[in-house]
Image: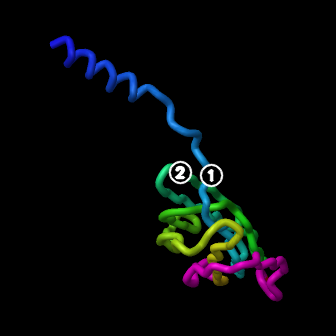
């Protein structure tokens, strides 16, 4: 009986030992490349989950503009929404790593309808910032 109590105590103590510090995800940087041709701002949010880490974030998509928004490094599975409606979910490709960019291209039409292209992995970050001609008139 004494051995059983000692074994149970050892298991409880092992459960209290803290593990290694949580590391940031080792994946690509998420970039949203959005052309919002509607007259209203929209909200983009994302969440990801992988072994040992998870995260979430949000960005405001300005009306009548094309913008590229670098957000966060992500890994594992992800889910993305615009104004609460899910637009994309998937898994970060295993070959995508640090120093690369997972780019999601969004087009928000004048009526607010969202189209999302399939994500792509790029070696360099796209950079766009411009007003959309004739938008909001």
98 relative to 38, above or below: above
Outermost residue toward the front in this view: 3
**Alpha-carbon distance for marks 2 and 1?**
7 Å
Residues under numbered marks 2 and 1 in contact, where contact means CB atoms less than 8 Å apart? yes
Residue 111 is drawn in which quadrant?
A: bottom right
Q: Quadrant of the C terminus?
A: bottom right
73 relative to 135, above or below: above
Residue 1 shows in the view? yes
The crowding category of the residue bearing disc 2, from other C-alpha atoms within 10 Å (few below 14, some 14 to 19, many at least 20), is some
93 or 54: nearer the eye? Answer: 93
State left or right for residue 76 relative to residue 6.
Answer: right
What x and y, as percent, mark residue 6? 27, 16
Residue 127 is drawn in which quadrant?
A: bottom right
What x and y, as percent, mark residue 60? 71, 63
Q: Give the magenta part as a residue range.
A: 111-136
Residue 27 is drawn in which quadrant?
A: bottom right
Looking at the rendered structure, the number of numbered marks drawn on it comes to 2
Outermost residue toward the left in this view: 1
Sequence order check: which comes first, mark 2 or mark 1?
1
- The numbered mark at residue 24 is 1
Residue highlighted by disc 2: 53
123 relative to 84, above or below: below
State left or right for residue 129 relative to residue 72.
Answer: right
For the stretch drawn in magenta, the main secondary structure is: loop
What x and y, as percent, mark residue 119? 58, 79
The crowding category of the residue bearing disc 1, from other C-alpha atoms within 10 Å (few below 14, some 14 to 19, many at least 20), is some
State the SS at label 1.
loop
**Residue drawn at x 58%, y 54% as measured from the top left:** 56
């Amino acid at each position: 009986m004494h051995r059983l109590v000692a074994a149970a105590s050892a298991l409880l103590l092992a459960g209290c030992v803290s593990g290694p510090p949580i590391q940031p995800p080792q994946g690509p940087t998420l970039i949203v490349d959005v052309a919002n041709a509607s007259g209203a701002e929209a909200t983009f949010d994302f969440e990801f989950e992988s072994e040992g880490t998870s995260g979430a974030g949000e960005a405001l998509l300005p009306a009548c503009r094309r913008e590229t928004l670098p957000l966060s490094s992500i890994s594992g599975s992800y889910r993305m929404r615009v104004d609460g409606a899910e637009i994309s979910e998937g898994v970060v490709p295993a070959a995508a790593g640090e120093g690369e960019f997972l780019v999601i291209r969004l087009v928000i039409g004048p009526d607010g309808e969202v189209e999302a292209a399939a994500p792509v992995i790029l070696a360099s970050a796209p950079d766009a910032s411009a007003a959309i001609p004739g938008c909001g008139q």
